[in-house]
Structure formats: structure tokens, C-alpha cells
Image (spheres, helix red, strand yellow):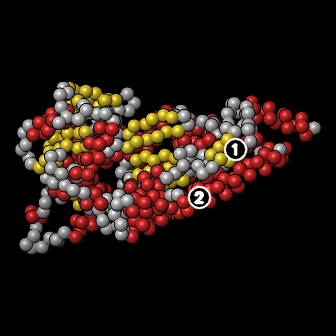
Amino acid sequence: MKAAAFVRAARQIRSILGPQRSRILSRDGRGMSISVEKVGYDYWSVTGIGKFAFPFFEFSKAFSVDAAAQVSNGDLNKAGPLVEYERRIGAGELLDGDVRQVRTIKELQRLYDELVENSARCGLDRYATSEKSGRSRWLWSRFMPQLSYSPVKGLYLYGGVGTGKTMLMDLFYEQLPCSWRKKRIHFHDFMLNVHSRLRKHQGVSDPLEVVALEISDESILLCLDEFMVTDVADALILNRLFRHLFGNGVVLVSTSNRAPDNLYEGGLQRDLFLPFIATLKERCVVHEIGSAVDYRKLTSAEQGFYFIGKDLPGLLEAKFQLLIGKSKARPQEVEVVMGRTLKVPLGANGCAYFHFEELCDRPLGAADYFGLFKRFHTLALEGVPIFGIHNRTAAYRFVTLVDVHLISHLVLHSWPDEYVMYENKARLLCTAEGSPIELFERIVTVADAQQMAPRTSSRSRKNDDLDLCVDNELGFAKDRTISRLTEMNSKEYLERHSALLQENHWQVGE
């Protein structure tokens, strides 16, 4: 009778589920572990009856977890971001003596150790996880809703510009086993991807839940660079999105210029965003890097890519022609998203030429800029103005452009069962009305404005700078943009860029 009941239950489950493939061998990144061969339909874990009918299944599963833990624990002190950080300092690749960076890398090492130790419980190994699609899992969750939080908390790193947050997170990411379900992505690009997926799942009762399932299927460890919320559409969905992600076991590692409590400060309908801050602080350890050094500004200045002056006719075009060499520049179009295209006034040999107004005085955004830099490695931008209240919107777009410009040119190569992403930072050639600092002198935060000299009988309203722009978000972001513009014009940055061009066999104009 028990056998007959078991067969009936199995058939019912099989009628619901599609055929699922599974691996016989799986890796946790440190060694081989043993798992049971499951051919045809994966219904033991769904019904929960496998552990009663087949005690060997539970034994073999426990054996694989214990064996993996033993192998992993033996290697904990031999690998990880701290070891690599110390190696780079010893090789002269990084500066020594930054105590705050050392504290941060130790936090990343702690997280690395916890992830390795709990890799099986976290479901990090892509070869040992279910292959059901996000929509299939969503359908099943309608019948058996459940939450599965990771036993490991994530890490939220924040601090000033140029303090090495991105470098440290990348160093951490590079030490992770290749077999893990992980992704490192810029926050701008991540949210564009989320909105694209939401459009794909229109008509589903809860498309955000399906998107979260898809993301967690692909990546249990999610590393987001430059977490910064400025868009109300992003702000309104982040809490539900990350509640689903965390409920699916996702571990978040993120960098930001802002503490969690200061995210989306002064934004529209911020009261609806506040629950996300609480969720973020609950699921992540918050760590301030706090370094007072802007490492981007320690680079050597380079002449020839950032030209200052209001009236420089023909200069940028001549420099652009030097870059493209014998290639002939012509108008082009690049595909952006959802079938949209962006017109490029002149393009050749991986270089694009724009007037400032064509990129920043039009209704364009991060998606357009990502599309542009997937096609071009160098941007020649004519006439960057001094920013103030009269061109505040253009200033926002310029900040986004520089953000995307610095982290762009992402090339995705597909290999069996894994993805490898290479990040080539793009190059900026421009003419501007002032230095990077001078461009943003009239952009201030509320706190900056309050520290300015108050009006007196000798200083009246007519003495005010009428073009002063008091904007907390923009005033905060300007420091990052100034730092990045400085780095992008450095000798080291430009030499790295030229080396990458040669590696990728781009023609370089002389």
C-alpha cells in the first residue's frame, strides 16, 4: 500500500513538473562533492518524501555537504581578497599604509570565508542547483510559498569618492570560485536590466516576483557597484524587488558614496522608499570605508584630452581626426533598447564625436549611454559648459554620462555553463569651459548653501549668484564626477586604455 501511494504521488508530481536535468558531480569551488544522480523528474525535494523512502539520499547529501565543508575549511586561510590585497601591496601595485582600506578588506575576507564555509547551504554552486526557469518557479510558488534567506549576510560598503571601494569589491569578486552563481554589475546597468525584464513579463500577476526569481536563479551572490538611487521609478520598486531577492537567498555586496540612511535623500515619495533602507540594513553588514585619500587624484596629469576654453574652433575635430587615423568619419546609428536607436553625428574606428547639447540637452539616459559605449571606446565631446540652475538637467545627464563612460564597454563571452565579463574603461576627449572643479562650482548641497555668508545690510539679494543650483543629489554626485574626470585624464588611465585597444586589435590613429 505504501509503495502504491508513493507511485501515485510521484505520478501526480510528474504531471505538474517538466523534465529536469541534473548533474551527477558538482563543485563547491574548492573540491568535488558527491550528489545523487536524479534522472528524469526532480520531485524528491518537492514532495519531501524522499528522505523517508530513501534514507541513502539524505546520507549522501549530508556526506557531500560535510566533505565540501572539510575541503573548504582547509583552504580558508590560503585564499581570498586579503591574501591578494597583501600580494599586490608587496608587488608595489597598491599603496601601503591605508588603515581604513585594510579594515575594509578584512570585512570582505570575513564575508568570503563565510560564503566558502556555507557555499552548499547558500546554493552558490551553479552545477548543483535546479534548472527550472524563473517563471516555472514562480508558478510553483503559487502553490507552495516559502522564503529561504541566506545564512550569510551581505556587505554594504560606503565612503567618499576615489577611496578604493570599487577596486576592493572587484578584488573580492575576482577571488570567488568560477563555478559560483555570481554577478558583478554597475547599479545603473542592473536597474536597466530589471526594467527590461519587467516589460518582458507584462501580463503576469506579479512580474516583479518573476524577475526576482530569474535574477536569483542566475546569481545568488550579487555585487552592485555605485548604488545610487535618483530615479523615482527605481525607488518605488526597490523594496519589493530586494525583499523577493533576499527571500530567494540572494547575498548582496554593494558599494556606494552614501550611507543607507542617506539614499534617495529628498526624492519624490521617499516615504515609500524608507522600508527598503530597513530591509537593506537587516540583510547587509554596513561598513564605512572612510579613507580620506582620493586615489584617482594621485595619478599623473596628462595634456591632450581635456581642453579648457570657450572659443576653441576646430580643435576637437582635429584631435578626433588624429584618433581615427585614415578612417573616414560618417554619421552612424547604434541600437539602444527596445528597438530604439541613437544617432551618432560622426563615428569611425571606435571613436564617436558629439556636441554637448546632442548628448546632454536631449531626453537621453543611462540606457542610451550604455548603448553608445558598447559600440565606441572613445567619446569626443565638444563644449561642456559651466553648470548652474539654468542647465541643471543637463548637469544630471553629464554626471550619468561620465558614470556610464567610466564603467562601460562590457564584452560578454559565452562559455559552457559560465559567463566571463571583461570591463574596458572608455576614453573621453573633450573641450570644456573650465576645469572639472570649475564646471560644478555653482552646484551646492543644502548644507553648503547654509554655510555661505548670510545676507546683511551690506550683502543683499542682488549680490547673490542667480545661477547657483542648490540640489542635494547633484551636489553630492559632483565630487564623484570631478574625481572621475581627473582620473580619466591621467597618464596611467590613458596608458591602460591604449594597451587595451592594442590587446583587442583596434586600430589607433597616430
Which label belongs to residue 41? none
Identified by mark 1, the residue type is Met
Give the residue drawn at x 25%, y 27%. Answer: 332
The one of 128 and 445 positioned closer to us in this rendering: 128
User: In the rendered view, does 52 fall on the left or right side of 474?
Assistant: right
- In front: 144, or 417? 417
Left or right of 375: which side holds 491? left
Q: Give the answer, above or below, for where 312 lies relative to 252.
A: above
In the rendered image, the vertical position of residue 193 relative to residue 285, given as above or below: above
Q: Which residue is mark 2?
A: 75
Give the residue at x 70% y 55%.
66
Q: Residue at x 74, y 48 (%)?
A: 61
Confirm whether residue 410 shows in the render: yes
Q: Nearer the viewer, mark 1 or mark 2?
A: 2
Q: 412 or 80: nearer the eye? A: 80
Image quadrant containing the C terminus:
top left
Say which element carries label 1. loop
Question: Which percent across, then down, holds residue 265?
Answer: 36, 59
Q: Earlier in the sequence, mark 1 or mark 2?
A: 2
- Are there few (<14), some (14-19), or many (20+) residues within 10 Å of tag 1? few
Q: Residue at x 56, y 46 (%)?
A: 180
Residue at image mark 1? 144
Query: Percent x, y for residue 26?
Result: 65, 43
Q: Which quadrant is home to the N terminus?
A: top right
> Can you give x and y, in whole percent of width and height, for residue 240 in the image?
52, 49
The residue nearer to you, when weighing 240 against 427, is 427
Q: Residues within 10 Å of mark 2 (few under 14, many from 20)?
A: some
Name the element at disc 2.
helix
The kind of residue tagged 2 is Asp
Q: Is residue 53 above or below residue 291?
A: above
Seen in the image, is 239 located left or right of residue 125? left
